[in-house]
Amino acid sequence: MIYTLTLNPSIDYIMHVDKLQPGGLTRSTATAYYPGGKGINVSRVLSNLSVPSTALGFIGGFTGEFIRTSLKEKGVKEAFIETDEPTRINVKLKDGRESEINGPGPELSDSLKGRLLEQLHTLTPEDVLLIAGSVPSSLPEDFYREIAENLKDKGVPMAVDTSGRALKDLLSYHPYLIKPNRQELEELFGETMEDNRTVARYAEKLVEEGCRNVLISLGGDGAVYANHEGIWFAEAPKGPVVNTVGAGDSMVAGFLAAKEVYLTDEEAFKKSIACGSATAFGEDLCTKEEAEALYDSIHIYKEGERR
Ligand SMILES: Nc1ncnc2c1ncn2[C@@H]1O[C@H](COP(=O)(O)OP(=O)(O)OP(=O)(O)O)[C@@H](O)[C@H]1O
Ligand SMILES: O=P(O)(O)OC[C@@]1(O)O[C@H](CO)[C@@H](O)[C@@H]1O
């Protein structure tokens, strides 16, 4: 079973505006709301791709209830731990650009934290644990490391989509998959990476450090994928960009879904791009059909081989 962990879920409240009036009243032209948080997005896309998963993390209040109900309707299993305070609402403002205001999330006590660690201890090497998103400020900054340390002797494969200190902390635990975007990769190595060849060298470095599958997402520029057998490049399909929130999560879901049905690494890479771009081209996270429609148009090539 794939378990997705979202420490700080959200309702994503999308607000379209013609022109934002800072300090004044702006009337939104259209709104929508979706269950959000990176792990939850991965679970939602997995469900669209007919791959079961269980969503874990902390939720609470009326906002948490909305997430529970939405996941139930989609047939996503969940085993959330209830918080006293409500789950946060993250505002995604669209005025031709995309601006995001993410809430801090509820206070999480030591006892809630302990319950999560106990829950995670029941996972087995046949499972995959996806760790995604920021660590809420009420938890220790190195909480992901604590989780990894706790699972160290259990052989649970970990897929990681986080940034900064949390990402750095997890590298030494040899994750099954990591998916930094360009900015997160630059932050990790303290280098600016202008071209994809440079990105590839750092992806290779991460493989040498023990990450089994390294997916670097490059937004509209596509992606780079590295494992112990080589490095692949892909351009992103061209299309009308409607919403990139969750594009990276869709990418992770596409990769994990492909590996669940034993597709090759190259096919998994292609599927990850198809899912990421299909999400970027739609209002909500991609459906199976939307991702399939893009799959054949994606050309990938291996470093050292003819394009
Ligand atoms: N403008 C775009 N055109 C086509 N595809 C895109 C575009 N932006 C994103 N994508 C697709 O989505 C994938 C992930 O995008 P990106 O690098 O923006 O992830 P991210 O920064 O992790 O996103 P997020 O954190 O918002 O989920 C890309 O590899 C690509 O396949
Ligand atoms: O605050 P975090 O945990 O870093 O990110 C949360 C978030 O921005 O990430 C998802 C998109 O990837 C959204 O659904 C959600 O609002």
Image: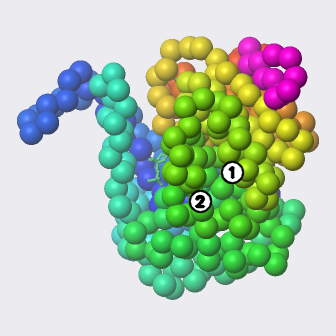
* Of the pair 218 and 39, the residue shown nearer to us: 218
> For the residue labelled by badge 2, is the local secondary structure a helix, a strand or a loop?
helix
Amino acid residing under circle 2: Leu
The reply, left or right, for residue 247 in relation to residue 129 is: left
Q: Is residue 8 magenta?
A: no
Alpha-carbon distance for marks 2 and 1?
Answer: 9 Å
Q: Position of residue 235 (x, y in %)?
A: 67, 21
The reply, left or right, for residue 99 in relation to residue 67 is: left
> For the residue labelled by badge 1, is the local secondary structure a helix, a strand or a loop?
strand
Q: Main secondary structure of the magenta part?
A: loop
Crowdedness of circle 2 by 10 Å Cα count: few (<14), some, many (20+)? Answer: many
Q: Position of residue 285 (x, y in %)?
A: 57, 34
Res 203 → quadrant? top right
Res 28 → quadrant? top left
Residue range in magenta is 297-307
Q: Position of residue 183 (x, y in %)?
A: 51, 43
Q: Which residue is mark 2?
A: 167
Q: Position of residue 284 (x, y in %)?
A: 52, 31
The reply, left or right, for residue 167 in relation to residue 49 is: left
Q: Which residue is mark 1?
A: 178
Residue 292 seen anywhere in this rendered image of the structure: no
Amino acid residing under circle 1: Ile
Q: Residue at horizontal 57%, vertical 41%?
A: 181
Q: Residue at horizontal 48%, vertical 37%?
A: 245
Q: Are marks 2 and 1 in contact (CB under 8 Å)?
A: yes
